[in-house]
Amino acid sequence: MIRLVREIGAATVRFVEELGQLGVFAGAIVRSTVSPPVRVRLFVAELFKLGVLSLIIVCVCGLAVGMVLSLQGYNTLVRFGAEESLGAVVGLSLVRELGPVLTALLTTGRAGSATAAEIGTMVATEQLDGLRMMSVDPIDLVVTPKALAMIVVMPLLSALFIVSGLAGGYLVGVEMMGVDSGNYVSSLRASIDFYDDVAGSLLKALVFGMLTGLIATHRGYTCTPNSAGVSAATTSTVVVGSVSILISDYFITALWGV
Amino acid sequence: MRGTEARHEAQVAFSNVGMSFGRREVFRSLSCGFPAGKLSVILGGSGSGKSTMLRLMGGLVRPSSGTIRVADTDVTTLSESRLFEVRQKLGMMFQGGALLDALTVFDNLALPLRERADMSEAEIADLVHARLEAVGLADVDDLLPGQLSGGMVKRVAVARATMMQPAILLCDEPFSGLDPISAARIERLLLGINRDHGITVILVSHSVASTLRMADHVLILLPDGPIEGSPTTLASATDPRVRAFLGGEVDETLIGGGEDPVPSGLLS
């Protein structure tokens, strides 16, 4: 019994310690963001790597999710003779929940893991120590552009996922199932409120972007400097990132009603 | 390169330094010094803490006890931002080069200048090309580090470490994994940096022959404490530990082990 309590205590201390380290790391990123120099070129390069290179996967997945959602929604709604509400069902599901959450999970898997692996490899090959010895802060040069790009990219990718999903939903609902296109579009427009739904969705994506950016860069930056350490950092970025996204999604939804 | 004033302040001193990685103790109470303007070599067996000493000098790791003075500053208690000031007097060549693999050779060399010096791109380009020429690599500036041979990586790393005209150059295993011609080229390069420009060079090496040839000052890390002196005094030393190390006549009591040529269990 005492052993169990001791283990729980040790695990709690470890968790709090890691949380504290993450807080200090986030503080360093914020400090580096607000202090010169502004690294526009590096930031744009990261936007390309994290954003543009994720476009295809996000669009394809968005389209597929919209199509499935439309198919399932139609089969359910048609039982109640409410198939003209298909646009609202597809739209609300995508905008409020599936768009930001699935985009964040996809981005964590693709861009988050790549970010952790890239920084982790730099740690393992002493590239970050090399920067330190040249009096260049690795957080400023390497970490901050990646973390900021992740924050900016997430709402944009989420918006793209939602648009692709709506198109997929239209394709299946209107073109395949025969729902009236006017009904699909009008129920969509009538049900979605800009402030409650769209702004809330962007807010969620923004928070997910912060979480993914912070977790991926922190895991890479603090990894054990060997190949196993890089592998562990990559895996834990996906696991911790995904769990954090899903848990924070619940709290954002519960607290702000988004 | 840097003037006389900077050369005189280039001195490193360890005082009662203790260092452990987890339960493994690397140093208990290490005290030693590296004279300004000289070429010092740190020798020692694998795991004796040679590379750790360089990392301690650069403030990349912190000791568990003691002080380390680098150019009259105790680096053991400095914050990271203050360490950046001290590191402007240091250049470090890492064992694997530590070149940024996403940048070309030119950009690797230009990086410290773009970050720390107030120079135009044209001035930076001139300086980078001059440095590459000095290390005998005039035609590699557009290549990525991954496209270079081991010897070329080491020479680029030396060039990068000297870009900011350091007062002290730290080199971790500059000759490891190199063929004799490449090793001789690096040796000549380091000697030139020390003799012609007065930069204090502290390097870690396994090569006894090159150490005796080029060093002004040698520190040998042995299990029961360090021994230091000039190559001449160490070469004529009667201490069996020094003779064993320099002559390769290995005394079993120094390395541990038993009578079996192959310890049981190793190949079973």
Image (tube, helix red, strand yellow):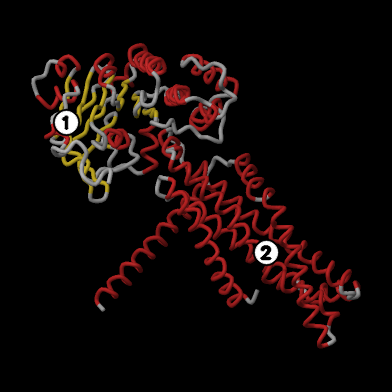
Picture quarter containing residue A17?
Answer: bottom left
Q: Amino acid at mark 2?
A: Leu
| Residue pointed to by mark 2 | A202
- Give the label on residue B226, or none: 1
Badge 2: few (under 14), some or many (20 or more) residues near its Cα, within 10 Å?
A: many
Q: How many marks?
A: 2
Left or right, A256 with reference to B159: right
Badge 1: few (under 14), some or many (20 or more) residues near its Cα, within 10 Å?
A: some
- The residue drawn where x is 71% and y is 53% is A55
Q: Where does residue A205 sit, x and y in percent of width and height?
A: 64, 63
Q: Quadrant of the N terminus of chain A?
A: bottom left
Same subunit under labels 2 and 1? no
Q: Regarding mark 2 in the picture, which secondary structure is present there?
A: helix
- Give the label on residue A206, or none: none
Q: Regarding mark 1 in the picture, which secondary structure is present there?
A: strand
Q: Where does residue A92 sit, x and y in percent of width and height?
A: 74, 74
Note whether residue B183 is visible. Answer: yes
Q: Amino acid at mark 1?
A: Pro
Q: Quadrant of the C terminus of chain A?
A: bottom right
Which residue in the rendered view is the most extreme toward the bottom? Answer: A80
Q: Image height check: is B227 above or below A27? A: above
